[in-house]
Amino acid sequence: MYLILLALGCSGPEPEPMDRSTDSGTGIPDLDPEVRLGTGSDAFVLLNDGDEIVIIRGPQGSYHVEGSLQVQGINAGDAKDLSNPDNPLTTFELFDELGVAISGLEEETLLDYRQGIDPSDEPGVYEMLGRTIYINPELRDTDLAGQMLTLTVSVEDVDGVRVEDSHSLLAVPHPLN
């Protein structure tokens, strides 16, 4: 009798049924394509219209803001291989309250990153953290303080799926500038 109980105890738990919200057995949820614009270099901080965006003075004297994103439902490429042809194109752009592009250096207003996007802790969601969005070198933080700036992001994968997000944000100089 002891052997029968031991054998029953070793049979292990019943396998859990497959989660039907996932696609074809990959274990990754089928999520609609979407990108969420945020900030933060260590952790993603979601941005909403009216939130503050901090203008940071860099070590060489120019100014920038930090952009981050979370994205789902696209081909996120390979975050460990910058040369992977499947990596999506991510573009950040910053506009002043008149709609004039103020991001970039040397007359280049778009800040493009062609790289894979890291998986987040949430299945099927990927994130890119702490990207530097340079501000036109002719502008200072005090020129922009109190303005409603528009920060935009777009991500386009190799399959042509494109997602975009933008928010109007209150420009605030970093206290240590």
Image (cartoon, rainbow, N blue to C red):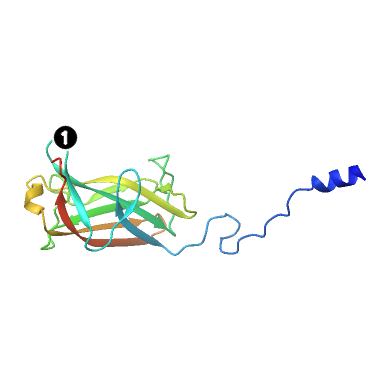
- Residue 118 versus residue 148: which sits nearer the camera? 148
Q: Is residue 64 above or below residue 19?
A: above
Q: Position of residue 98 (x, y in %)?
A: 10, 63
User: In the visual, does 118 lie left or right of 123?
Assistant: left
The quadrant in which the C terminus is found is top left
Q: Position of residue 112 (x, y in %)?
A: 27, 49
Q: Position of residue 20 (x, y in %)?
A: 60, 64
- Residue 70 versus residue 104: which sits nearer the camera? 70
Neighbours of disc 1 within 10 Å: few (<14), some (14-19), many (20+): few
Q: Position of residue 61 (x, y in %)?
A: 11, 37
Quadrant of the image occupied by residue 166: bottom left
Q: Is residue 62 above or below residue 96?
A: above
SS for callout 1: loop
Residue lying at the far front in this picture: please name it: 2
Q: Which residue is mark 1?
A: 59
User: In the visual, does 11 lie left or right of 50?
Assistant: right
